[in-house]
Amino acid sequence: MLELRNITRAYELGGERAGVFGVSLSVPAGSLAVLAGPSGSGKTTLLQVAGLLDEPDEGEVLLEGRSVARLPEAERCALRLGRLGFVFQGFNLVPVLSALENVMLPLQLQGRPEGEAADRAAALLDRVGLASRMTHLPGQLSGGQQQRVAIARALASGPALVLADEPTANLDHAHGEPLMDLMAELCAEQGVSFLVASHDPRVISRASKVFRLDDGRLVGAP
Amino acid sequence: MILARLAFRNVLRNRRRTLLTLLVVVAGYLALALAGGFIAQTFEGLSDGAIRGGLGHLQILDPRGLEGDEAQSLEFALPDGEALAARLRQDPAVLEVLPRIQFMGLLSNGPKSVAFLGTGVDPGREVRHMAVLERVADGAKAPGGAGSRWLSSTPGAREVVLGMGLAKGLGASVGSSLTLMSTTKDGALNAVDVEVVGLQDLGLRELNDRFLTVSLDTAATLVDAGGARSRLSVLLKRPADLERELPRLKALSGADARPWQEMASFYRQVRLLYFAIFGFMGLVLFAVVLLATANTLLMSVMERLRELGTLRALGLRPGQLLSLLQWEGAFLGLGGSAAGLLLTLLVRAGLNALHLQMPAPPGTSHGYELNIHLVPAVYLGAFLFLQLTLQLSALFPGLKAAKLRITEALRHV
């Protein structure tokens, strides 16, 4: 599904060289993999390279067997829109759109008819337990509900891989646990791969594969 | 469509800021539309003044007469002008033909003589189609103008209507007897005694000081014109057809034909001046609206960096982000222009209802009532101008958004 080969992405941070260095890993289809490690270990950097949000200095990113790291921006956009989903730590929903419209957004950007997009978005919101909150704006939802909307949005276009950056970091225990349960269920149910960056033990405990990063390097065997 | 919907919601997001931006657009629209309506009133007044002041819609003449002074009266006249006028009156496009004899000479009350520019006109036809009665009515208010009337159509009546300044220069009033002196077309000196029957206000001080009007019969006698006429002023049944009819009437007359705009140099000068003022005002408004709205849109982009980064992460292309900002500019322009249109109609109605008297424009001798015209083309032009300005103002923030590094935008708090 996703294979990273010898990825290096370095940048200056406070006068020191930070990032990821020579990281190789693979995420099989339908698996829930976790990038674990302390803050500043390079989890987000690696996730951004894997999600085609950033280009590696060295190395290759293979998505569904295709080398994609250095594609032109238009193709990277198309891949992000169609084959990848994103869940962010801060939820990152569009505040002026309702929950339903947020989930419809990737579908409408793909040019799907509004009715079809609305049906698919409604079904996904129903699946994440927010059928009664579809018309609510993000500001009218709790953090846990917003993250569920974000997961529904990430799954809307039927991606092969969802990349989640610290999805439970802004949630308390009561909301974080069910969210991880939901992600594990969706992973098994929809055959979508998840690559989650987190140092939360609750998340790591649900992973089918764990990659540990320390100072930008992969440590230990997955 | 999703981009348009998103842009519309974004515009409504910070309502106070949007309102301030809209106020700038509304003020711009109001200024352009009202100035355009005022200028349209001025142009209409000037063109009407030129056409009904004697030029007609077009003039049939000998072009050499435009190049310099005639050495003697009617040197560059239409030799069979009266016959030509009769022929042109038969044309279906022509409403009326008003022959003119132009001459110059001295006007004397005995002890004092003053140089004049004279025009001989057909009193009956002139009063039906030209603004002579208004001019005489205004002249009647001047000292010595009491009892002013227009020239009578009685053949052989030797009457004159003087410009107010000319009358003042000679100490003449209605009822005064004066002597017109000029040269005939053969160069001989001739004189005719006339009675002042009216004073006229021609709107320009320079004309009032020099100009007088007599009947064609009087002028023809003075300069021994016979059937010759200096020029023919032609009025069309459909003024809008001027451009189409001009070459045909020129060919029909066998002389030169000039449209009134070409003959009305004052009109052309004022028009140029107003266009320059309007253009400068437009430039200032463009700069003000551009800077104000670009600043607002840029602030809105800076506040939404993470959101824009998220949209890019979801797959929105840089060009689509640019479009999003263009839509936002478009909505601001549309909203501002719509509100501006309503406000313009209200302000226009209010100002016109006040019947404000405007001071006399430079070079003219009387003021006029303010009547700001409703000109759809100006309103449409103001809308297009502001819309273009808003699209331009959205370009810079849009380009900034489109060039965002996604990873940096996502880190933005």
Image (spheres, helix red, strand yellow):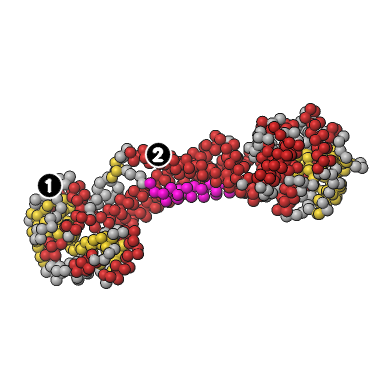
Judge from the rendering whether residue B164 lies leftward or rightward of residue B2; answer left or right: left
Q: Are marks 1 and 2 on the same chain?
A: yes
Q: Where's residue A43, x and y in %?
A: 81, 41
Q: Is residue B235 above or below residue A172?
A: below
- State the residue at coordinates (65%, 37%): A98
In the drawing, what numbered circle is on residue B166? none
Res B72 visible = no
What chain does badge 1 belong to? B
Front-most of A117 and B254? Answer: A117
Q: Which mark is residue B147?
A: 1
B209 w.r.t. B232: above or below: above
| SS label for mark 2 | helix
Sequence-earlier tag: 1 or 2: 1
Given residues A58 and A173, the one toward you in this image is A173
Outermost residue on the right side: it is A221
Residue B136 pos. (x, y %): 18, 50
User: Which one is in front in this view, the residue at disc 1 or the one at disc 2?
Assistant: 2
Q: Check disc 2 and give the amino acid type.
A: Leu
Residue B50 in sight: yes
**First to last magenta residue range:** B374-396
- Which residue position holds label 2? B346
Using the rendered view, name the quadrant where residue B247 is placed: bottom left
Report the predominant secondary structure element of the magenta stretch: helix
Kindly identify the amino acid type of the residue bearing the numbered disc 1. Gly
* Element carrying mark 1: loop
The percent position of residue A4, horizontal first and vertical second, equals 84, 49
Residue drawn at x 75%, y 33% is A129
Residue B387 located within the stretch drawn in magenta: yes
Lateral position of residue B300 relative to residue B168, left or right: right
Label 1 neighbour load within 10 Å: few <14, some 14-19, many 20+? some
Q: CA distance from mark 1 to mark 2?
A: 43 Å
